[in-house]
Amino acid sequence: MKIFHNPRCSKSRETLSLIQEQGIKPEIVEYLKTPPTVEELKALLSLLTMRPRDIIRTKDESFASLHLNLDDDAAVLVALAQHPELLERAIVVRDGRAVVARPPEKVRDLF
């Protein structure tokens, strides 16, 4: 199991706690320190069966300054790679499946 985690986010911490309560020791990717590449984001989206617009935090302050067209998948992917703080959190991957753990209890779909 792998979690794309932001330790400053209470929902991400809660998701990690739910995973650990199951006795699982996930690979923790602090994506603000190690941002995913465009290719990694594409792979995640394939597992999630979502579009880039579905995993970007549109309420984040830095989102407005980018003036992104959310229908332009390529532009949104580049923005997410360059501004990892915009990535929805937490994203959890296990055995070829993935979820955006919003709310955190959504991670239970992977247990």
Image: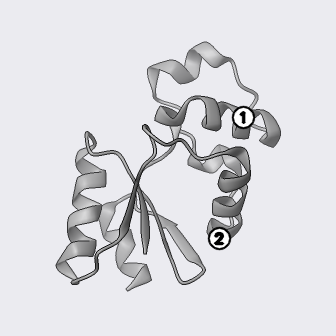
Residue in front for this viewpoint, 97 or 49: 97
Residue furthest to the top: 65
* Above or below for 91 versus 78: below
Q: Amino acid at mark 1?
A: Val
Q: Position of residue 90 (x, y in %)?
A: 40, 55
As measured in the structure, the alpha-carbon distance from the residue carrying label 2 to the one carrying label 1 is 19 Å
Instruction: Decide if residue 65 is in sight here.
Output: yes
Give the residue drawn at x 28%, y 43%. 9
Left or right relative to 25: residue 63: right
Left or right relative to 70: residue 91: left
Q: Secondary structure at mark 1?
A: helix
Left or right relative to 71: residue 111: left
* Above or below for 66 versus 111: above
Give the crowd class for mark 2: few <14, some 14-19, many >=20 residues within 10 Å.
some
Label 2–label 1 contact, CB within 8 A? no
Q: Secondary structure at mark 2?
A: helix
* Above or below for 69 versus 44: above
Give the residue drawn at x 71%, y 25%. 68
Mark number displayed over residue 47: 2
Left or right relative to 45: residue 55: left
Name the quarter where the C terminus is drawn.
bottom left
* Image quadrant assignment for residue 25: bottom left
Name the quarter where the N terminus is drawn.
bottom left
Give the crowd class for mark 1: few <14, some 14-19, many >=20 residues within 10 Å.
some
Q: Position of residue 79 (x, y in %)?
A: 66, 31
Instruction: Decide if residue 57 is in sight here.
Output: no
Q: Which residue is mark 1?
A: 78
* Above or below for 85 versus 7: above
